[in-house]
Image (cartoon, helix red, strand yellow):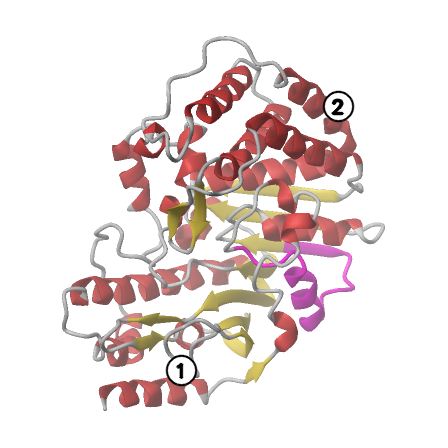
Amino acid sequence: MIASKLDAHYARLQAKFAVTEEARFAPLVVPNGNLERPFYRWFHLKEAFSSELLPEILKRSGMDNRQELTLLDPFMGVGTAAISALDWASQSIGRVVRVLGVERNPFLHFAAKTKAMARLCGPTLAPVVSELAAKMASPSGSPHTNPTLSTFQNSHYFPRTTLRHLREIRLVLDQQQPSLATDCARLALAACIEPVSRLRRDGRALRYEPEKRRPRVGVEYDRRCTEMVDDLLNATPVEADVRIVLGDGRTATLTTPGLQADIALFSPPYPNNIDYTEVYKLEAWFLGFFETAADFRSHRHLTVRSHPSVKFSESAFQPPLALDMAKLIDPILAVVPADRYERERRRLIRGYFTDMAQTLSEVRPLMKPGGTVALVVGNSLHGRSEPFVLAADIIIAAIAETLGYQVREILIARRPTRQRSPHEMLRESAILFAV
């Protein structure tokens, strides 16, 4: 009975919007093809969207034929939107693009910035990266001690010879003068870490696979560097201004004052209990972005409240949003089962939608009048004995409307095939707003 009331709540909210099934968006809201495409493949983010999403959104928004474009992404990840914008600009003579990206995770920020800056440099950077890669063929010297993260101390996960070779490469790179080429070589090293280990990213965790087929470190590193050099040599020139800052997308106006974007394209963390800091911790620790458990935990407290892995601070909606937000989420809170996870689920629901409201509030003044905001998000199923759906797309659209956006459409891109419930609201969507 309670669950049916939640369904009715979602139905009432959804009835206000244009909601359509768009099968052609199914491969666009996931990183379809990114593993094979130049620059995108330098580091793969399983939670990214496709390199083809931006062109489709531009076409749908009537901006595909313009000569100048300013793009904002407050959740930059590894730079998919930035590289997409640069590719778009390179396809027509005279096109100019400006990109502003914000990313909270220090390793992902490093990956995004390195890829975008390298894409701008193109062929001029290739010989320097090639020369650096050659130095890794026979690394010498005493390698660093292992990162303090306990995962690296486990020889089942990282055989000693594997870890030693990774550390030897890092030693050589640390001895180089800081440069974009060195950053490229460091990113290639980061991209090797999971493949050469007996671990695999699987949903919200790193899984141990004792029978995993693993390439040798030297072979994998050489392959990554060769791909980088090929991509650089074949990069077409582009006129662009790219700025990717380490910061918080929920306070975007602090890092992007005065920006006037034509389009904002982003995919915030989904409210699905995945802690991305945990999932991509190997690379961050190995490259030295985290050195102590305290550093790591402190960073996790700074992330979007999409998971219960740490005890985030409680927050309340501030006037004048408080009443509207309560109307939107109280029906969800009413169905949270009274079990041992009740408090964590309530905290996640309040925290997540507070963060989404804050993000949209920050993005709006950074947009040109008539600009487009495109947001990709997935709904999720919570609870086992009394499961309920957290319809993030509908709630975020309703929040946007409250904040003064015009919700153009909700495009249902794909539906999960392996969930426990066939609920109609379980889906991944692209929401388009007008400013």
Classify 10 Å Cα crowding around label 1: few (below 14), some (14-19), many (20 and above).
few
Residue at label 1?
A: 423
Residue furthest to the top in view is 141
Count every numbered label the image shows and give the total. Answer: 2
Residue furthest to the right in view is 93
Residue 66 position in % (x across, y down): 76, 61
Image point 35% across, 60% down: which residue? Answer: 355
Residue at label 2?
A: 127
Q: Which amino acid does label 2 sit on?
A: Pro
Q: Give the range drawn in magenta.
A: 48-70
Between 111 and 302, the one lying in front of the other is 111
Image point 17% across, 67% down: which residue? Answer: 342
Between 252 and 289, the one lying in front of the other is 289
Q: Can residue 256 be seen in this view?
A: no
Dot placed on the residue nearer the N-terminal end, 2 or 1:
2
Query: In which quadrant of the rendered image does the C terminus lie?
Result: bottom right
Q: Which amino acid does label 1 sit on?
A: His
Mark 2 vs mark 1: in front: 1
Pointer 2 with pointer 1, Cβ within 8 A: no
Image point 14% across, 70% down: which residue? Answer: 339
Asked which secondary structure carries label 1, the reply is loop
Residue 226 position in % (x across, y down): 71, 31
Whether 55 is among the magenta residues is yes
